[in-house]
Image (spheres, helix red, strand yellow):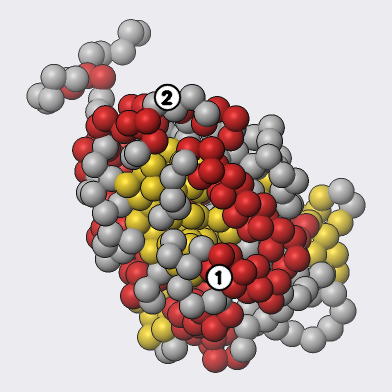
Amino acid sequence: MSAARPAEPLAGVLRSVVARFGTPAYVYDLRELRSRVGRLREVLPAGVEVLYSVKANPSLGVCEVLAGCGVGAEVSSIGELVLAERAGFADQVMVSGPHKSAELIERLRPGVLVSVDSVDELLMLAQECPARLVLRLRPDFTPFGQMIMGPDGRFGIPVEELGNLPRAVRERVVGFHVYAGSQVLDGGQAAKNLAGAFELGLRAAGMLGIDIEVLDVGGGFGVPAGMERPELDLRPVRDELARQRAELPMARLVIELGRYLVASAGYYLTAVRGRQTRDGRAAVVVDGGVHQRPDLCGLDLCRAGAPFVLDSRSGPVVRTDVLGCLCLPGDVLAEAAALPPLGAGDVLVFANAGAYGLSAGPTAFLGHPAPPEIAVDGESIVALRDRADPDAGLRDQQSVWSADGSPARRPDRPR
């Protein structure tokens, strides 16, 4: 199945992007980004905070737009924290992840939330960290999603480990963080994840004898990878969060979303360079590849995320594989996609590509220059990141023959 084409005005803007910047390229539709946040706000109960998981797309321009919409940030490294500060998320930030570097801890301010992933980390951060601490709890209920973080997962503290925490350490805890599953495409299942997280948080608070000031119940709302299928129904989510809001009216109730906020705003553009065959099917080779559009989250993108042709045409379609530019057998962007006969110069567009794209891939593999990232806002086109120079990969490297920093003549090669 091929992906749905955008409205013609946006298709025209994409043609302008190709003319100015070439391919491959990432394009982000800022109007869709703002609209996505607006539609979410219309559904969510008042008072529910939204954090953007920066890992989904750490483009500075994308983050600036989301910060301008009043969304907070969830970050997992010193680099993401610096980006969040630069983008304008201010103190509406939560730091998560299994490890916080010394540089990250030194940069934290008192208003920032820190999600603590283990008891050992809690004992350390309670002494060294000025920020507000929430405990990430390992789900002990049945989670839903294409990627789940259940009782056998690696993240978070099992609730049974909380009973022996010293009183001084308990007093540093202001709440809890539970994340059960990602890429959840069913609204009822998403609501069940939130409900399980809420009940687990209440249980942990009772064990520690503390009041909950902050409760992050996760999120993980999914977006179809490109197929024409219904969007996630948020009505069950709305009802569940309204129940939680009523039961904990004085606490900060938080959800965290990545893909759901940015995927639909993104397009990956790549051009056909020649025809091939694969497994008895027609195939084309393009100038992009999985180093720029990786399947980091295991969503089977090569089957689920079929492209469309930018300059559409009538006529019979052919089951076609789209092969990337890498010397790698697994570099397949689409498999058996329903496409018209293609030739050199045709531009293929992968929709719903705004999440886990450029920054999530092995961009340096084979030394292909990283593609540009372009923002479109109506008819306005702005480069957020230029195409990398071919020598970009050498800028942080140093020759063995000048290790002391001074020019040195390379020894003559043996004859």
The residue located at (69%, 76%) in the rendering is: 235
Query: In this rendering, is residue 5 above or below 219?
Result: below
> In the displayed structure, would residue 143 be above or below residue 312?
above
Identify which residue is drawn at 63% across, 63% down: 221
Query: Quadrant of the image for the N terminus?
Result: bottom right
Q: Residue furthest top?
A: 414
Residue at horizontal 39 percent and vertical 42 percent from the top: 173
Pinpoint residue 139: horizontal percent, then vertical percent.
Answer: 64, 42
In this picture, residue 413 sits left or right of residue 186: left
Residue nearest the viewer, comparing 206 with 1: 206
Q: Residues within 10 Å of mark 1 (few under 14, many from 20)?
A: few
Residue 57: give x, y in percent of width and height: 46, 59
Residue type for callout 2: Asp
Q: What is the count of numbered marks?
A: 2
| 407 relative to 272, above or below | above
Question: Viewer-proximal residue, 70 or 302?
Answer: 70
- The foreground one among 291 and 78 is 78
Return the residue found at the far right.
280
The residue pinned by badge 2 equals 120
Q: Position of residue 113 (x, y in %)?
A: 35, 50
Disc ID at residue 83: none
Q: What element does badge 2 sit on?
A: helix
| Residue where numbered disc 1 is placed | 246
Q: Secondary structure at mark 1?
A: helix
